[in-house]
Amino acid sequence: MTDPFVHMENVAKRWNSQLGVENISLSIPRGSFVALLGPSGCGKSTTLRLLSGLELPDEGQITIDGRNVTLAAPSERNLSMVFQSYALFPHLSVAENVVFGLKVRKVAAAERREKLKRALDITGLLGYEARRPGELSGGQRQRVALARAIVANQPLCLMDEPLSNLDAKLRASVRKDIKKLQVDLGITVVYVTHDQTEAMSMADMVVLMKDGRIQQTGAPEDLYYRPANTFVAEFVGAPPMALIDGRILPGFPGAATIGLRAENMRLADPGTGRLTCHVSECEFLGSETFIGLSHPAASGLTVSMPGLKHIPTGEEMEITFADEDLHFFDEGGLRLLQPTGVSA
Amino acid sequence: MNAFFRRIEMFGALLLAVIWISPLLFAFWAAFHTTSDAVNFNVAAPWTLDNFRTAWAGAPWLRYFLNTFVLVTVILAGQFVVTTLAGFAFAKVRFPGRDLVFILVLMQLFILPEVLIVENYAMVSRLGLFDTIPGVGMPYMASAFGIFLMRQAFKGVPIELHEAARVEGCGWFGILWRVYVPLARPTYLAYALVSVSTHWNNFLWPLIVTNSPDTRPLTVGLSIFGAPENGVDISVISAATMMSIAPLLVAFLVFQRQFVQAFLRAGIK
């Protein structure tokens, strides 16, 4: 399959006052799970709505399955959608909600019943057919929304923060269910989230956005190990990558900013460390403790220590790290492949 | 001090209620007694159904009931169609000049229907609908109040439901019919109650535009029945009045809770 299943080419959407999206180019292979990730207001939902046809772009072209659908209506794009609020019809029962689209498309009753049964079976909702959405728990409503999305066998499913209304425990289990569903059914999923854990754990491909523009597109490990710029470096990973002013680390003259992940940082014996910092906070997570460090020329310095540690705030600590674990960025925040030996 | 005021308030409410209902109670009492007993407030007088027999024989009531029923139904049906479509357009369709047109529609609320009686009369005659039930109902079908009510109800429907229906393949009418109308049911009920009671009781306009027993609604029939040239018999008129308000009164008593709840619910939105 050389042609991408979904393709966006230089798509832009502008509103008078609000920030839209600019210059969105994206190729999504068939059967993949793509996460649109970013802080709120970054344009990820707009991008999804452009794909769905609920918004039409001002510029650019969108093709789905080889068909130009730039200006097509949502119903002509052969896709299904899961909304953040689930958008279940409160006056219809679970069964009626699930087959709503089939009914609109005038699918025969027998076929409808069969597809309904299959969708309810997959989502574990058999026995709830007659309930109204108001009588279901948040997790069950979420599954009804999923059932409605898969019942018609559409090859593309768009999900707009489908887990943000669930509690943390449920979120982890539904996350696995959605991923399994996507793999089992072989559908293509485009998934909007602001939660990087969701994006990193579920997606084959992550699209990180900020201020209406794509910052980086790639596999989760690409974003983690090879962030394209300082924004990606700081957004991806928990704790985020620490950014150090290049001037205080001698030996890398081309790099304006140097990035370093917590797991690559070690405490050093007094006198042997490469940076001397002060403890600013301790965050106990069970198996480890994150120790936040402050340094006048660096941000987000965190070192991970096993087990429970209590270190008084303000105590001096020295840290060390290996050169090959460093990430280098230029003045504009873009990643440098190699720190140039020559002064910039 | 607080308790005192509360008592005053209670007393005031009771007083108003008594003043309000006393004509109805008197009419009810008079309808079941002879005229002289009714006028002289003879409490011990025997009850009788003669007034109803006399009244029933005096006019084609069945025809009047049917006319009123058809009139109220035609108006309500017309109002549902017009207010649904207009309310939906004002709530969810973007078109140039929408706010201006909506203000023009709302201006209708400031104009008393009586002011337009002559113009409406001329219009209905020109349309050839004089002395027909559609002619009586037509001026009320594009109700500004109804349009406003429906617009508010439709505005309260979450946009995600609209979008979900669009993704599932609904067109404008499909969305309206499958999503908005079912969700606005409490509003439709509240509006139906107001509309039915208003037009069941409406008098002046039907009096002017109807001319024959075939189209006359109850109110007009009752006024002709009770007109002085037929001789004033309080008891018989009371009996006729009781007959004409009975269906509405019974309906109100039966649906009392829904009536009040419908208004609360429609108001909250």
Image: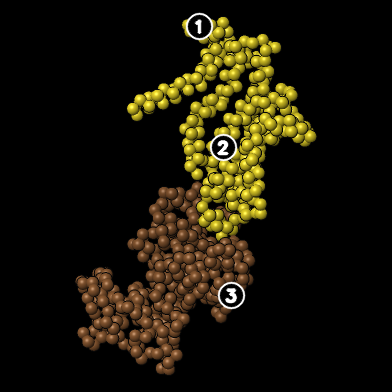
How much space separates mark 2 and mark 1, taking CA atoms?
Answer: 42 Å
The residue at which mark 2 appears reads as: B191
- Quarter of the image for residue A249 reads bottom left
Graded by Cα atoms within 10 Å as few (under 14), some (14 to 19) or many (20 or more), the crowding at tag 3 reads some
Name the one closer to the observer, B190 or A248: A248
Q: Amino acid at mark 2?
A: Tyr
- Which numbered disc covers residue A9? 3
Where residue A104 appears, as percent x and y from the top left, is 58, 55
Chain B is which colour? yellow
At mark 3, the secondary structure is strand
On screen, residue B94 versus residue A304, left or right, reads: right
The residue at which mark 1 appears reads as: B42
Q: If the image is split into quadrants, where does the N terminus of chain B sit? A: top left
* Discs 1 and 3 lie in a common subunit: no
Where residue B269 appears, as percent x and y from the top left, is 50, 44
Chain A is which colour? brown
Q: Amino acid at mark 3?
A: Glu
On screen, residue A311 versus residue A165, left or right, reads: left
Q: Please tell me which residue is depicted at 49% across the width and 29% down the height of the picture.
A: B254
How much space separates mark 1 and mark 3, taking CA atoms?
Answer: 93 Å
Name the one closer to the observer, B181 or A10: A10
Name the one closer to the observer, B222 or B22: B22
* Discs 2 and 1 lie in a common subunit: yes
Graded by Cα atoms within 10 Å as few (under 14), some (14 to 19) or many (20 or more), the crowding at tag 1 reads few
Q: Please tell me which residue is depicted at 65% across the width and 25% down the height of the picture.
A: B203
Q: Where B180 falls versus A37 (above or below)?
A: above
- Quarter of the image for residue A288 reads bottom left
